[in-house]
Image (cartoon, rainbow, N blue to C red):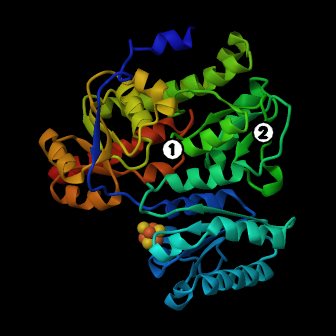
Amino acid sequence: MNMTSSVRIKSGCSDAPILKERGQNEVFCGLTGIIWLHRKMQDAFFLVVGSRTCAHLLQSAAGVMIFAEPRFGTAILEEKDLAGMADAQEELNSQVEKLLDRRPEIKQLFLVGSCPSEVIKLDLSRAAERLTLKYAPKVRVLSYSGSGIETTFTQGEDACLASMVRTLERTENPDLILVGALPDIVEDQFLCILKQLGIKNVTTFPSKTKDSAPRIGENVKFVLCQPFLGDTREALQDRGAIHIAAPFPFGEEGTTLWLKAIANEYDVDLSLFEKVTEAPRNRAKKALEGISNKLSGKSVFFFPDSQLEIPLARFLVRECGMNALEVGSPYINKKIVMPDLEMLPNGPVISEGQDVDSQLDRCRKAKPDLTICGMGLANPLEAEGMATKWSIELVFSPVHGYEQAGDLAGLFYRPIKRRELLKV
Ligand code: SF4
């Protein structure tokens, strides 16, 4: 089986014109990434330096944990702190000291910047360096921005991972790094398949603990698990690692091609690849059969929110038979999504950025069967009679890989089914 040539559709959407919009946009802020990152990184703590709004966002997004001590919090800098930067730095020092005294299990502390203009003026990277000197080697302090002014909600993870790259130790070994926080169950499935393929020394980034972090060097290769990791990709390349470009592992086809791209780099025998992937591929195809006939022929419209839009559109069109009308993404980094763009059949409007009012007009005119959008747009569109899916759910749910292919398609079918039931 020739995996690559069998799936290419001439150039698909790789050369399609991109409608670039720079108007008002509706996005969630980068602090959101803390919700899934703190679960993944078990010795990390995320200290948001922000306002009460940031604290409310985290509490409502993560649920208030009354009985368990969460591994994130907000250092709310009051106006008097912000009036004098020296006061603010002292306040931050004292909050960090109290936190680390009380929580000796913390090994990595992230100072996370936010929107308020006074917080932006604080030099959190200098504060992180100063605090690292004080608490090293037990605790490493890093900083990144989760501000909602210039980021979308998935970019918080990108900024967090990029901040860690310079701390990775060097190696000469040909290790493989899977980059992007995946639910443990999905990560274990991928590690198991890669092991069966005979690929050794596979690590994940972020790792569960500071001490199990991947190592980096010119012989290291990495593959992205999420399409929103542009800064992380560049930081890894700056340290010599080689990016394995591939379609993202959504659905049976996407997962096979993602694994195949890795297998090619490590000279895995084709017959071994076939043998190892045959059973999970068949399970994924079977799971998709049950749901794709319900999605087939339905139309879908993506508002830009997560940067997952292009790979997901490829999955919905090619594996579920849907018709993509518009595929909007906050940013289109062709170095990352080109393999998916090449496979997305010609037809949809490909848009980058947002001018929300004109995009809403296009959506209403197109009357899609399903609209994928942020939470802020979903309720008004539902009120107008449209079926919507929150794009944030696709980041919180296990959706990658063979075993999740059916669930992924199911996530898109549910709102359509609900809307059909409401019509009866
Ligand atoms: S970082 Fe900005 S957008 Fe996000 S919760 Fe704080 S104030 Fe709001």
Which residue, given by chain and number where applicable, does mark 2 sit on?
A: 216
Indicate the amino acid at tag 2.
Ile
Which residue, given by chain and number where applicable, does mark 1 sit on?
A: 228
Relative to 91, is 240 above or below?
A: above
Q: Going from the N terminus, do you reach mark 2 or mark 1 first?
A: 2
* Residue 131 showing in the rendered view: yes
Mark 1 Cα shell of 10 Å, populated few (<14), some (14-19), many (≥20):
many
User: Do tag 2 and tag 1 residues touch (Cβ < 8 Å)?
Assistant: no
* Residue beneath the point at 25% across and 29% down: 297
Q: Position of residue 358 (x, y in %)?
A: 18, 48
**407 and 208: which is toward the camera:** 208
Relative to 117, is 20 above or below?
A: above
Q: Establish whether ligand 1 lies closer than 8 Å to the Cβ of label 2.
A: no
Q: Establish whether ligand 1 lies closer than 8 Å to the Cβ of label 1.
A: no
**304 and 201: which is toward the camera:** 304
* Residue 371 showing in the rendered view: no
Name the element at disc 1. Answer: loop
Q: Position of residue 350 (x, y in %)?
A: 30, 33
Left or right of 141? Residue 365 is left
Q: Nearer the viewer, mark 2 or mark 1?
A: 2
Q: Quadrant of residue 298?
A: top left
Mark seen at residue 364? none
Q: Position of residue 77 (x, y in %)?
A: 55, 83
